[in-house]
Image (cartoon, rainbow, N blue to C red):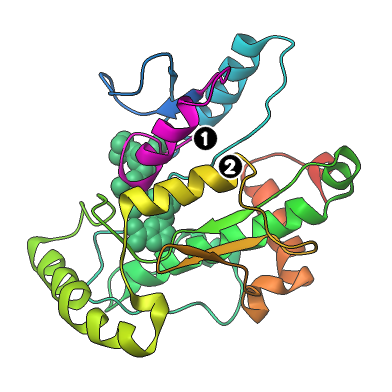
Amino acid sequence: MTGATAGLSAHALDRIAAQPGTRVIIGARGAGRKVPAGVEILPLDLASLDQVRGFADAVLQRIGDARIDVLVLNAGMQSPAIRAVTPITPKALDPLALAHPAKGGLGSGMRAYAASKLCNLLTAQAVAASADVQDRGVSVVAFNPGLTGGTSLGRDSSPVARIVVRALMGAIFRVVGLFKPEYVMSTAERSGEQLAQVALGVVTPPPGRIYVSLVKGEPTFPDPSELARSRDAQQQLWRDSADMVGLGAGNRL
Ligand SMILES: NC(=O)c1ccc[n+]([C@@H]2O[C@H](COP(=O)([O-])OP(=O)(O)OC[C@H]3O[C@@H](n4cnc5c(N)ncnc54)[C@H](OP(=O)(O)O)[C@@H]3O)[C@@H](O)[C@H]2O)c1
């Protein structure tokens, strides 16, 4: 698991680690992380590709011949450049530009965040559609916890931004949520519980679908956006990402 040291995934970790006969390895940055008894921690700062590679090697070394049954890739962050909550999904796909969004400007942090989530969905679908994954019968699920309070996602925002977000969440979203249930805030416990259910295969999308999106803490299985469903965009992102991290042609889908 990644991102299991805080927020909703820390609750998911509690539930997954409590399953009998389950061995859990998490990647975490920094030292002295508090995790349930028996959970193994390996160093991982996802901002460093060297550390990503080191983590993958260390996991393989540690598990030896054992098989990995479940990967929970939850880590994420929001840019401190956020000034207001404006979920803007990019209309065109340019992975290089998404990886290096223009600095500054109203909503630039949120655009970068939305772009990162779009890339998550594109990547999940690209992996799900790959012949290797299909031949091996691996299930790929893209999980959106929906609006979830009580996590540390906005921790890097300025105090002013945090007040704006809290006001939006506490007042405006409460009213909007009367008409649009996806704006109703869930709790970290509930979203974490649902993430664990998905990871453990208790909640599964219907055949042919891979997207689980919580609304009011309950799983729904909507179509991703048109752009997220574009096979061309999925392949372009995979190709460009492979080039950017130096994976080379052998890793093309
Ligand atoms: N909360 C929401 O409303 C919401 C809505 C939709 C999607 N999500 C997504 O759900 C996931 C969990 O969010 P959350 O709200 O629970 O956030 P959170 O409380 O901030 O937890 C984020 C986790 O990701 C880890 N992480 C961040 N950057 C990392 C890095 N460079 N290297 C290694 N680990 C890193 C953090 O580790 P540290 O403990 O070291 O900081 C932490 O464990 C994220 O992907 C988020 O984008 C959240």
Q: Residues under labels 2 and 1: Cα distance? A: 25 Å
Residue 109: where, in percent of width, then height?
33, 67
The quarter of the picture where residue 177 lies is bottom left
Q: Name the residue under label 2.
A: 199
> In what element is the residue under mark 2?
helix
> In what element is the residue under mark 1?
helix
Number of disc labels:
2
Of all residues, the one furthest to the bottom in this rendering is 179
Amino acid residing under circle 2: Ala
Q: Residues within 10 Å of mark 1 (few under 14, many from 20)?
A: few
Q: Nearer the viewer, residue 237 or 37?
A: 37
Q: Mark 1 points at which residue?
A: 49
As for residue 22 lying within the magenta part, the answer is: yes
Frontmost of labels 2 and 1 is 2
Residue 182: where, in percent of width, then height?
41, 76
**In this picture, which residue range is highlighted in magenta?**
1-24
In the rendered image, the vertical position of residue 225 relative to residue 32, given as above or below: below
